[in-house]
Image (cartoon, rainbow, N blue to C red):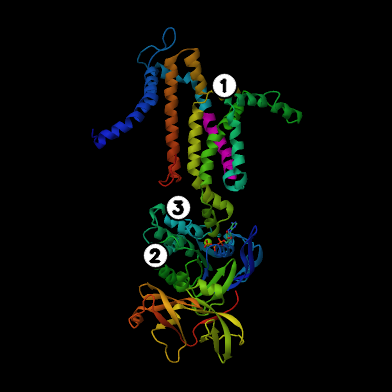
Amino acid sequence: MAEFIGTTKRYGTVLAADRLNLAIRRGEFLSFLGPSGCGKTTALRMLAGFETPSDGTILIDGVEVGAMPAYRRPVNMVFQNYALFPHLTVAENVAYGLRQRRPRVAREDIATRVARALDMVRLGDFGPRRIWQMSGGQQQRVALARAIVNEPKILLLDEPMAALDAKLRAEMQVELLNLQRQLGITFVLVTHDQQEALSMSDRICLMGKGRIAQIGTPRELYDRPANRYVASFIGRANLLPATVRGVADGRVVVTLASGDQVEVAAAETVPGTAVEIAIRPESLSLSPHPVEGTPSVPAVITNRIFLGEHIEFQLTHPVLGVLQVMVPRQTERMLPGADVGATFHVLWDRGLGQILAED
Amino acid sequence: MALSNRQARWLLLGPAGLWYAMLLVLPLAVVLVYSFGERGAAGGYQPAFTLAQYANLATRWTAFKNTLMLAPLGTVAALLIAYPLAYFLAVRVNPRWRTLLLVLVIVPFWTSILIRSYAWIFLLGGRGIPALLADLGLGDWRLINTPFAVLVGIVYGYMPLMFFPIYVSLEKLDRKLLEAASDLGSPPWRSFVQVTLPLSLPGVATGSMLVFILLMGEYLIPQMLGGGKVFFVGNALVDLFLQSRNWAFGSAMSVTLVAVMLVVVTLYMRFLKRIGAAREDVGLM
Ligand SMILES: Nc1ncnc2c1ncn2[C@@H]1O[C@H](COP(=O)(O)OP(=O)(O)OP(=O)(O)O)[C@@H](O)[C@H]1O
Ligand SMILES: [Mg+2]
């Protein structure tokens, strides 16, 4: 569908995008995720045609578009602050793209398609309104309608929900997903909100410092982070240094710095290698006693944080440092005495945890 | 002392209302009353109630004709020159150079209009541009004391008044809107017509109004560059009030000028509203 091939963008000495290689698939929902300044917007703007790559190319449908101006590209964008035309009505805004088509689209045809697009974003009756008569959430839907009415090959969205409150954002996320399913258009979303990316995307392209850190399904990024950066950016992780002890048919046993042996997920490595292990707080559990057959590490509870559905425990181990353990609310009842100051055993079930590659 | 809301409002509006009455309503009322009077035997004003002055207006038709031709023409010419300049400075120029270029636009206007008009007298006079054109074999041109000279002076003198409102409206134009237009398939020139131009219309309206209204009362430029051959209503008024001392007739001319101005301004505002510049989110003036 669209492809970045070694695409690089430099602003003076700033490397905003560094040799991006990425193939966007037809009909997928792809998110660019990453912290502020990592180059997400830059990547999107190169795809839209507002920036020309300093190096490398971009293909859309197999056609090289490196220097093709934005107005010739079969993509449309929903801007962060919507960028709606204040001198036009809602319907005129939505019709804008169709009116630019040459040969011209018939007037009745435009009207029908605008009405359909407005219906799709549930703004059917708002056509004659002025932009400044619309709320923020409504403006966002106008921006969406203005883009999808053109039936672009790719719909680009630059943090479209950043300006909405939490409740509205959750609603819009659902609406966006429904819309994408209905239309079958490829969506490319830029966001710095990992929850948004995890819940909406077919695939996430996680970026850091202008580079792609990992591309994969939300599950892959969460369960099998490629490196330390990914592990610490997506969700939370305990990062522990360890040494590989034994590798046998899909099982890797490592020794933690504390001397305890645990079994982690399969990886290509050899005994004796010094590695770093990432394990999610919810993969660990607590017990007042050691449990037969399950490796565990004793540690002192230093914090107990109520998060609603979960309780987060922070425990301190003299060698391993702080360990985070997330306990579901129901399980907490089976942990009497798990208060600050008590010593508990952190249980590490077989095969959980992941060896991280070098960054 | 407790003031009711209503009393407080009148108290606060008082000073402004007084200014308004003293500086605008009163002089206009005086002029209106005078316009129905007669010239005194020794000049000045003599009370009467007659429409004789108005009946006499046709004798000064040339002044009205010149004003009503050159004021709109000057406004349009100033617009045609100021708009591209403002567009260039507000949109195109590297922001690093913008301040410097803006200063360059303003600096000439730090000298008196009198001095600048003298400069134009020289430039347009026999030894100025016409001499240059003759040397180049481009024929024999007479520029000074023609309507053209007055037009040049007007455009030159009033350009900043046109320039700044347009510049401001273009400068605050959100660049994202142009990106959005481009994203939606519109090439640059069409984005200009469909987005930039309509959004800068409030500036155009303000600038045109300022220039047009002031031009209708212009006196100095026709005097200097028109050399008495191209004169405005303003020149006629100076003549009537200071030379022939016919205050009644002068007042009738003034009243007529104000009336014409009101009509033209009202029509212009209507027109702007029709093409959509007058929106509630963007103040027209
Ligand atoms: N027009 C520009 N001129 C110079 N530097 C730029 C320009 N646009 C972006 N940059 C730089 O390129 C880098 C990447 O910017 P980009 O806007 O792509 O980040 P981002 O990931 O979208 O961040 P955010 O989440 O804050 O929007 C940043 O360091 C930024 O300062
Ligand atoms: Mg951004």
Q: Which residue position is annotated with label 1?
A: B223
Q: Are marks 1 and 3 in contact (CB under 8 Å)?
A: no
Marked residue nearer the N-terminal end (3 or 2): 3
| A248 up-or-down from B171: above or below | below
- Which of discs 1 and 2 lies nearer the camera? The answer is 2
Residues at marks 1 and 3 on the same chain:
no
Look at the numbered disc 1 and give the secondary structure of its residue: helix
Q: Which mark is residue B147?
A: none
| A230 up-or-down from B37: above or below | below
Asked if residue A217 shows in the view, the reply is: no
Q: Nearer the viewer, residue B103 or B129?
A: B103
Instruction: Indicate the chain on which mark 2 is placed.
Output: A
Asked if residue B83 shows in the view, the reply is: yes
Return the x and y of residue B227 as percentages of the image width and height: 60, 20
Secondary structure predominantly adopted by residues drawn in magenta: helix
On the image, which quarter does residue A167 sit in?
bottom left
Q: Which mark is residue A166?
A: 2
Distance CA(mark 1)–CA(mark 2): 68 Å
Q: Amino acid at mark 2?
A: Ala
Quadrant in which the N terminus of chain B is drawn:
top left
Q: Which residues are magenta?
A: B68-88
Badge 2: residue crowd in 10 Å (few <14, some 14–19, many ≥20)? few
Q: Which residue position is annotated with label 3?
A: A88
Look at the numbered disc 3 and give the secondary structure of its residue: loop
Badge 1: residue crowd in 10 Å (few <14, some 14–19, many ≥20)? some
